[in-house]
Image: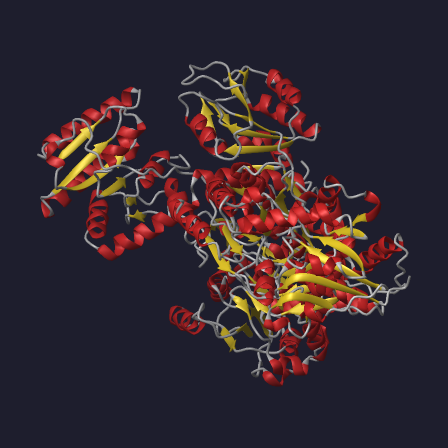
């Protein structure tokens, strides 16, 4: 029989209702095949009146098919049974009565619905279940498999595909967003999701949010949810939206990171499919009487338990593994093939054929969303460096594969419309912009913008494109977001790649470089330049930010030349609030009356004018303190201009001894606006730069400059022209994406061990415990066996070496081999083992391919008796270590002097912030009450400067009689300490300060020391001299939250951002600094803010997590030992 029509019937028709949407989908499929099809209901919402007819108008016919949608008691049963049509039930599931109160008015309707399921099989022609679970229910109720089929006539992928992807801006502060869509009802278990969110936030210590979208008509349940949210303190973390429009729902899908369901019953679970279609990974609990497992199939992850803690732990793993989430999305797209129009119609056609109902063959265009290979997101409409990179990478990718690339205009703080004038004059960019405004889904999305917002990216693979950074530390929230939202990143230099690894970016990283050849598209135009008449023309192009080294350049320039020389320094910059170049030059000229000539160009120039500058330049000079790449250097080389630049940073990928003149440098604490306390950049050597400039000047005067620079300039040109073109960068980017398939979905499991003292009275033992326990608690500990233990060892501790100079460390090597480790961290101290034994151990570990890390708590040479011990003995082995970890710039510089640079990293000491309860310590001096207390802390040794502090206090007390000095200085077990204690007591007595100074030389437990220090208004560390590289005592002082003053010694370099320094070490200088600080509220407030930032950045948990992520990244990115 060829049906005259196939119509549908349901009791009600509501917009957005699952059954109604299913009817509209079925109608569309049938009409597409040329079959007449209408929908009839007894109750229809007004907005559907043009799509659904009243059931009273229905006329049956023997050659008609009627699909009767059933999900609750049907009051039209009598009329339906009288129809002559071939009637099929479309069973949508009846929610179990157990999910409702016994007196709920819905109970009789549910019972009636099941009664009809049982009785209708006597007069129905067949039955269609919209899910496998509903099919099983029909079989359980006596329906023959011969007349039943499960066909999910619910999912309209064409509708979903038309919605994606919308570029809904995702605020930078939104760390990770969870979503559930469904009516707020107890059996949907939103309360379980709220509990899971609470546990998840506790596990991750992150501000993760949950959005619950759905009808909130069940007031009693909503009130319970609100009370639960309040009790758990989640008011700002949970959003209940109520019912929303389709557009708003789409936006929620696209602004979320994970769809989570703990629902106890789903007849089908349409939101699961909607989430998949919006490329939102799905995690769902599948109850025994729920269809979730079949709906999801292989397109999501199934939870076997609805336990909120289990759910939270699973989500935490998904947050930590973005490549797993990407794989889930990829599998979901394959799973969605089950729901294409063609698949659904073919199933319906075959099923109807079983009843001799012949549906015509038809063809459906495959309802795939538009796709593009690459979407580049970020600014692209200006001369801004990031905009140039985005624009030129997109153009290069598009040139290699036309119609494959799109540009989308956005910045770190939100989307914006690109400059229309720019688009009008760059039609090729306008075309890519229009592609970015379409609904095309990107296989790969790359972002380069500032700040680097990475949430809400909707590509199959999401990454940073040609990312750059200029100093050694990135903000921690950047790293956290990279690790949670990105599948990979490409960088502009090996320096940036190493920096990202060292900061704990544990995703696949690929160095692609950036191109320089875009500038060749412009013709040189000197008309925009000032007149330049001097012969030797030194060119500097930069933002003139402090890191660009303009102060170093001016100093060297004044030293190398004078006003009598035929030379000019051309400084090309642009107006911005981060430099004061005019003021710098004015001050410089006043300091150098015979200063050589300078040509300042402080305005934007287009590429034509920049090319003209390169053409007139004799040499480009870039004494930078930090570079991610150094584009002006590459552009200069492309114009055969010789380059002088700092021998460190991203530019050294192409600025080598063979292609440029490299300025020597020293490592130093970064003084940038980023505010990262442990960040390092370099100080270029102005004296060395001066010598280089003099050499260039001599060759210019001699007329030999051109021939002298030609070899390096030609080598540089060929390097840039072959490796640093945008075509090459685009190809490297494609290779990086293709290599992603080889990356593991899950974060590699570390097999990590640490050689250290442990559970002993040793500073390094304490350091190791604080470093490892937060994030690397499963590390195998290889400790020494000649020790008086302070605690019982756990099972992971192996004592397999003897501290001293006699152990060959063969037992230690065998223990490492037996443990099957891939990475070993060595905490080094000269007293732990002989240098020869350590040398042999390192060589053996490297030969076996084990990555080694060695922490050098001090790099200075020491005398062991009369024997000089130096780390230079280990140089060949240290070169092959995966990472050498140090705590100060001074140590980095010493390693540099030995030729060790590439594998060295500054890993700062951590600190534990103590929430001190202000509690009067036992035996506290009553004279402290109501006093302004100046404290000091640490072992009592001559070089600690306690006597100087006492003298300083005498001056302070004379001006402020309400002051009191609290000296918490324990005697060290050595005669020199006892002698110092006696000297201090005598000094206190001689200065008549007995009633105003408390000297406590007892060794106290940490909590008691902190309790004493909590009484202080300020803590002073008045050290006089020391060869130590860092101070544990000062970190204890900082941990109290009290303001801290130090003398200006290198031992305090690592806390410089958190303390105030006296001008010198004398009592007068100490007294002046202490008084000025205590009497200036503004200074105290500023110091407190800096200290709080420092404490956050140096929290042991963060330092431990950074080391774990660094280790993971080195494994993931296959960084080998040398």
Quarter holding the N terminus is bottom right
Left or right: residue 87 compared with residue 451: right
For the point 64% across and 58% down, the residue is 75
- Is residue 664 visible in the rendered image? The answer is no
Residue 378 x/y as whole percent: 60, 66
For the point 40% across and 34% down, the residue is 1028
Q: Between residues 586 and 93, which one lies in front from this camera angle?
A: 93
Q: Total label count?
A: 0
Residue 700 x/y as whole percent: 63, 69
Residue 202 x/y as whole percent: 46, 41
Q: Please, which residue is most extreme toward the bottom here?
A: 527
Report the colour scheme. secondary structure
Left or right: residue 189 compared with residue 1015: right
Q: Quadrant of residue 650?
A: bottom right
Left or right: residue 257 compared with residue 152: left
Quarter holding the C terminus is top right
Figure check: 310 above or below 497: above
Q: Between residues 805 and 108, which one lies in front from this camera angle?
A: 108
Q: Between residues 976 and 350, which one lies in front from this camera angle?
A: 350
């Amino acid at each position: 029989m060829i049906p005259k029509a196939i119509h549908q019937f349901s009791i009600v028709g509501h917009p957005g209702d699952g059954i109604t949407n299913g009817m509209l989908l079925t109608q569309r499929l049938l009409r597409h095949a040329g079959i007449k099809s209408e929908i009839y209901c007894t109750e229809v919402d007004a907005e559907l009146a043009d799509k659904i007819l009243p059931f009273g108008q229905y006329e049956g016919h023997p050659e008609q098919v009627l699909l009767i949608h059933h999900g609750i008691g049907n009051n039209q049963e009598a009329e339906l049974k009288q129809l002559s049509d071939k009637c099929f039930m479309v069973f949508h599931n009846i929610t179990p009565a157990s999910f409702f109160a016994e007196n709920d008015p819905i109970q009789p309707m549910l019972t009636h619905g099941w009664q009809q399921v049982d009785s209708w099989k006597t007069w129905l022609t067949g039955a269609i279940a919209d899910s496998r679970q509903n099919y099983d229910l029909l079989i359980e109720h006596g329906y023959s498999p011969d007349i039943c089929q499960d066909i999910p006539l619910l999912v309209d992928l064409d509708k979903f595909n038309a919605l994606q992807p919308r570029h809904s801006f995702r605020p930078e502060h939104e760390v990770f967003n969870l979503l559930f869509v469904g009516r707020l009802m107890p059996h949907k278990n939103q309360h379980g999701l709220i509990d899971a969110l609470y546990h998840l936030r506790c596990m991750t210590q992150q501000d993760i949010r949950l959005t619950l979208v759905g009808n909130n008509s069940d007031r009693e349940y909503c009130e319970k949810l609100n009370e639960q949210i309040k009790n758990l303190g989640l008011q700002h973390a949970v959003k209940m939206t109520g019912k929303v429009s389709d557009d708003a729902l789409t936006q929620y899908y696209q602004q979320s990171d994970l769809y989570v369901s703990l629902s106890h019953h789903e007849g089908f679970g349409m939101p699961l499919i909607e989430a998949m279609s919006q490329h939102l990974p799905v995690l769902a609990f599948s109850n025994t009487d729920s269809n979730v497992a079949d709906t999801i199939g292989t397109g999501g992850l199934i939870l076997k338990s609805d336990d909120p803690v289990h759910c939270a732990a699973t989500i935490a793993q998904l947050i930590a593994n973005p490549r797993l989430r990407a794989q889930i999305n990829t599998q979901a797209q394959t799973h969605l093939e089950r729901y294409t129009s063609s698949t659904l119609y073919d199933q319906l056609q075959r099923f109807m054929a079983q009843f001799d109902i012949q549906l015509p063959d038809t063809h459906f265009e495959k309802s795939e969303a538009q796709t593009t290979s690459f979407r580049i997101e970020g600014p692209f409409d200006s001369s801004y460096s990031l905009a140039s990179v985005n624009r030129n990478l997109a153009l290069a990718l598009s040139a290699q594969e036309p119609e494959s690339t799109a540009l989308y205009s956005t910045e770190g703080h939100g989307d914006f419309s690109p400059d229309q004038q720019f688009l009008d004059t760059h039609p090729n960019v306008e075309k890519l912009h229009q592609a970015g405004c379409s609904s095309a889904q990107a296989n790969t999305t790359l972002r380069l913008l500032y700040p680097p917002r990475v949430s809400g990216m909707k590509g199959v693979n999401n990454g940073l494109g040609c990312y750059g950074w200029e100093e050694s530390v990135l903000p921690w929230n950047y790293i956290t977001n990279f690790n949670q939202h990105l599948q990979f990143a490409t960088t502009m230099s090996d320096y940036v790649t190493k920096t990202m690894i060292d900061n704990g970016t544990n995703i696949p990283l690929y160095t692609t470089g950036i191109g320089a050849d875009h500038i060749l598209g412009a013709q040189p135009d000197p008309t925009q330049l000032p007149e330049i008449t001097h012969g030797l023309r030194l060119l500097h192009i930069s933002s003139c930010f402090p890191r660009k080294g303009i102060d170093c350049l001016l100093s060297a320039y004044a030293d190398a030349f004078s006003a009598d020389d035929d030379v000019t320094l051309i400084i090309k910059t642009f107006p911005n609030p981060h430099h004061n170049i005019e003021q710098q030059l004015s001050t410089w000229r006043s300091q150098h009356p015979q200063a050589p000539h300078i040509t300042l160009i402080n305005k934007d120039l287009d590429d034509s004018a920049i090319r003209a500058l390169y053409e007139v330049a004799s040499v480009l000079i870039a004494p930078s303190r930090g570079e991610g790449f150094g584009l002006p250097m590459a552009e200069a080389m492309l114009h055969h201009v010789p380059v002088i630049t700092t021998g460190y940073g991203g530019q050294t990928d192409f600025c080598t001894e063979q292609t440029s003149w490299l300025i020597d440098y020293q490592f130093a604490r970064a003084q940038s606006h980023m505010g990262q306390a442990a960040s390092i950049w370099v100080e270029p050597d102005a004296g060395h730069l001066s010598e280089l400039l003099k050499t260039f000047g001599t060759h210019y005067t001699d007329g030999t400059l051109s021939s002298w620079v030609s070899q390096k300039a030609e080598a540089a040109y060929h390097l840039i022209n072959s490796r640093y073109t945008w075509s090459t960068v685009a190809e490297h980017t494609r290779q990086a994406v293709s290599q992603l398939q080889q990356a593991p979905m899950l974060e590699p499991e570390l097999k990590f061990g640490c050689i250290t003292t442990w559970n002993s009275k040793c500073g390094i033992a304490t350091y190791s415990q604080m470093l490892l326990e937060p994030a690397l608690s499963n590390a195998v500990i290889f400790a020494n066996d000649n020790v008086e233990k302070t605690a019982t060892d756990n099972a992971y501790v192996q004592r397999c070496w003897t501290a001293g100079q006699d152990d060959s460390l063969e037992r230690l090597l065998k223990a490492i081999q037996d443990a099957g480790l891939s990475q070993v961290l060595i905490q080094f101290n000269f007293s732990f083992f002989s240098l020869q034994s350590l040398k042999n151990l390192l060589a053996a570990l490297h030969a076996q391919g084990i990555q080694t890390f060695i922490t050098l708590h001090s790099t200075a040479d020491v005398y062991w008796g009369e024997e000089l011990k130096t780390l230079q003995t280990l140089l060949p082995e240290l070169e092959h270590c995966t990472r050498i970890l140090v705590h100060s710039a001074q140590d980095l510089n010493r390693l540099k002097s030995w030729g060790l640079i590439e594998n060295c990293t500054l890993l700062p000491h951590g600190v534990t912030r103590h929430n001190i309860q202000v509690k009067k310590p036992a035996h506290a001096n009553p004279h402290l009450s109501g006093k302004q207390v100046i404290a000091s802390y640490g072992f009592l040794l001559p070089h600690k400067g306690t006597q100087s502090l006492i003298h300083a206090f005498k001056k302070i007390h004379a001006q402020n009689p309400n002051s009191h000095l609290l000296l918490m200085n324990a005697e060290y077990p050595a005669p020199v300490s006892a002698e110092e204690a006696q000297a201090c007591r005598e000094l206190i007595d001689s200065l008549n300060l007995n009633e105003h100074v408390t000297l406590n030389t007892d060794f106290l437990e940490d909590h008691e020391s902190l309790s004493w220090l909590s009484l202080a208004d300020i803590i002073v560390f008045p050290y006089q001299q020391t060869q130590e590289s860092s101070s544990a005592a000062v970190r204890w002082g900082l941990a109290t939250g009290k303001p801290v003053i130090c003398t200006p010694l290198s031992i305090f370099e690592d806390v410089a951002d958190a303390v105030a320094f006296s001008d010198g070490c004398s009592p007068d200088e100490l007294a002046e600094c202490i008084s000025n600080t205590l009497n200036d509220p503004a200074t105290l407030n500023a110091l407190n803010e800096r200290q709080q930032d420092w404490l956050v950045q140096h929290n042991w948990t963060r330092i431990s997590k950074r080391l774990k992520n660094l280790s993971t990244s080195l494994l993931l990115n296959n960084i080998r030992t040398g």
